[in-house]
Image: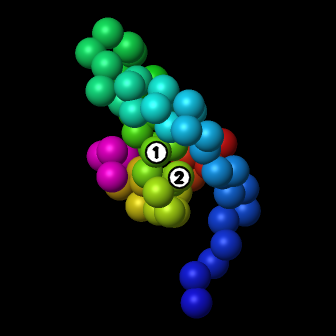
Amino acid sequence: MTRQQKHPLRELTAEEQQYLEKVSRSQSESVSRVVRTKILLLVAEGNNYTEAAHGVGRRCGDAVGK
């Protein structure tokens, strides 16, 4: 049985999904914005915060949920 996240994301609209995917591939956006975008996409796919943090090379999911 998996634990529910304290602050789950709402489902993304198609436009939001497209925008986030575009930003996640951007080479002109700041690194922190691209990383945050990738985290949002991973959480939207069903990963928990810790898994999403690990997916982008961070050690802890604490900063992801804030």
For the residues labelled 1 and 2, the Cα–Cα distance comes to 5 Å
Quarter in which the N terminus is drawn = bottom right
Q: Which one is nearer the viewer's eye here, 40 or 12? A: 12
Identify the residue at image location x=56%, y=31%. Answer: 15
Identify the residue at image location x=43%, y=51%. Answer: 42
Q: Secondary structure at mark 2?
A: helix
Q: Which one is nearer the viewer's eye here, 55 or 14? A: 14
Q: Is residue 58 left or right of residue 33?
A: left
- Compared with residue 31, is residue 53 higher up or lower down, i.e. above or below? below
Kindly identify the amino acid type of the residue bearing the numbered disc 2.
Answer: Ala
In reply to whether residue 53 is colored magenta, the answer given is no
Camera sees residue 55: yes
Kindly identify the amino acid type of the residue bearing the numbered disc 1.
Answer: Leu
Residue that label 1 marks: 41
Q: Is residue 27 left or right of residue 22?
A: left
In reply to whether residue 59 is colored magenta, the answer given is yes
Q: Residues within 10 Å of mark 1 (few under 14, many from 20)?
A: some
Identify the residue at image location x=63%, y=78%. Answer: 3
- For this orientation, the residue located farthest to the front is 14
Q: Is residue 15 left or right of residue 39?
A: right
Q: Assess whether mark 2 and mark 1 are in contact (beta carbons under 8 angstroms).
A: yes
Extent of the magenta region: 55-60
Q: Which one is nearer the viewer's eye here, 4 or 21? A: 21
Q: Residue 38: image x %, image y %? A: 40, 39
Q: Residue 32: image x %, image y %? A: 42, 25
Camera sees residue 50: no
Identify the residue at image location x=61%, y=40%. Answer: 13
Residue that label 2 marks: 44
Q: Secondary structure at mark 1?
A: helix
